[in-house]
Amino acid sequence: MKFKQDFFTQLPEFYSQVYPQGISHPHWLAWSDDAAQLIGLTQPTDELLLGLSGNAAVDGATYYAQVYSGHQFGGYTPRLGDGRSIILGEAIGPNGAWDVALKGGGPTPYSRRGDGRAVMRSAVREFLVSEALHHLHVPTTRALAVIGSDLPVWRESQETAAITVRLARSHIRFGHFEFFCHSERGRADKLIQLLNFTITQHYPHLSCDAAGYKAWFLQVVQDTAKMIAHWQAVGFAHGVMNTDNMSILGDSFDFGPFAFLDTFQEDFICNHSDPEGRYAFGQQPGVGLWNLQRLAQALTPVIPSDDLIAILNQYQEALVQPYLRLMRAKLGLSAVDVPSVEQDKQDLDLIGRFTVLMEKNQLDYTQTWRQLGKLDPTSKHCALRDDFIDVSQFDTWYQAYQQRLGAVADIPAWQTERNSVNPKYILRNYLAQEAIIAVEEGNLAPLHLLQKILTQPFAEHAEHEDLAKRPPDWGQGLIMSCSS
């Protein structure tokens, strides 16, 4: 790997230098070939294993943990930072640079009495969800690899430590701006320094002045809205949308108790630390706006409040339009040539009525969309009808759907196109759990098979139909902890 160290050299007050602590008997558990290509790597090697496990120095790495703050479950925590993640620097790839971080590399000044370690199950889950979201075309950070060990760590019980090697276009979070606004050290000059760095590194088409700052914040609002629109379309619940878990670039970030929906449930909660459902699936669009409002508060020393409010008022439209585009594609509806508020409203109503029917009839979100794409949309006889208890309600919806759909000239082509946007395979929590149990038993084959399927989620994989099935009773709606 070849590194540049722009964050390390230009923002010395924004991190603490800290070195990873190695793990005993490191070994590869998983590796992503296409993530490796992002930073110019081809295959896992013994030299890489030693370096990325913290057991040897990596040439050109500087090693540091960033400091930031954030709103966690609605309350402000003035000092957070990378408690178990150590960044090596920005690895230069063929199409840009990616931060390389060792998640689980050991304690840092921001570990808050924690051990700085990641357990194997959480490392594997982060790797798998990074793969899954990327191949579902959802903006996300990536995971290069998972490195296992026999180092014991304690959570609810004794487990073994592991490291996820995370790749991110940037590790800058909403919480970075909050820290340098609200902390005792917070000064406008530090905000401007961070803002100028962010724009120069990631928005080089923008200027570092008042006009550029406003244009940048608008882009952040739009990128965040687009990310959440993708979450809602694929049925992904992040679980911990604290502001310190929000990437300034609109990439899915910091995975803990996440889940893809099985049975559709608007108020599904995947985090057992969130009994009130602040971060429930259906709350994510609203939380996205709330988090952007917290970011806007931190930016008031450098951007006028009226400008911030005007930009925040564009959030809903910035979320609705990509959501509509994604959901129209899932339904096979033609795009609207001339934007129409009335047509958008009608299509949102059609989509909403269908998800309500899913919820009332306890249908699997991913399977139902996939089955819809296999129908002859011109036929009055719809096989999907048999999945609904109240068939009259479905018939009413289906008639409205057919009317909106209009004529379909090439039905096989239409079905093929639906299967290209409605995945057959998602990362169901029970599948991840089964893979983790197998790893604990020394069997990596289920993990590697699951990874392979998740990189091709729209394909049929007829020999692996079992991985597309609804969960067994024990795996339905699994709720995870923040250490997951």
Image (cartoon, rainbow, N blue to C red):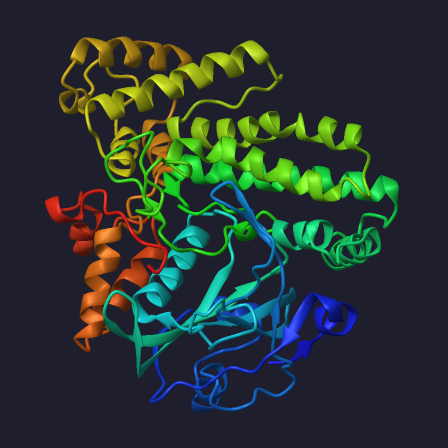
Q: Residue 20, how many percent across, how many down?
A: 51, 82
Residue 97 vertical placement versus 376 (above, below) = below
Q: Nearer the viewer, residue 154 or 290?
A: 154
* Residue 408 in sight: no
Quarter of the image with the C terminus is bottom left
Q: Is 345 placed left or right of 63 in the picture?
A: left
> Residue at 50% across / 50% down in the picture?
252
x, y percent for residue 372: 28, 29
Residue 392 point in image, percent of width and height: 19, 8
Residue 151 is situated, as x and y percent measured from the top left of the image, at 32, 83
Q: Identify which residue is drawn at 57% across, 73% down.
A: 109
Q: Quadrant of residue 340?
A: top right
Number of callouts = 0
Q: Name the residue at 33% across, 46% down.
A: 271
Is 66 displayed left or right of 130 in the figure?
Answer: right
Classify 115 as above or below 188.
Answer: below
For residue 233, side relative to residue 321 (left or right): left
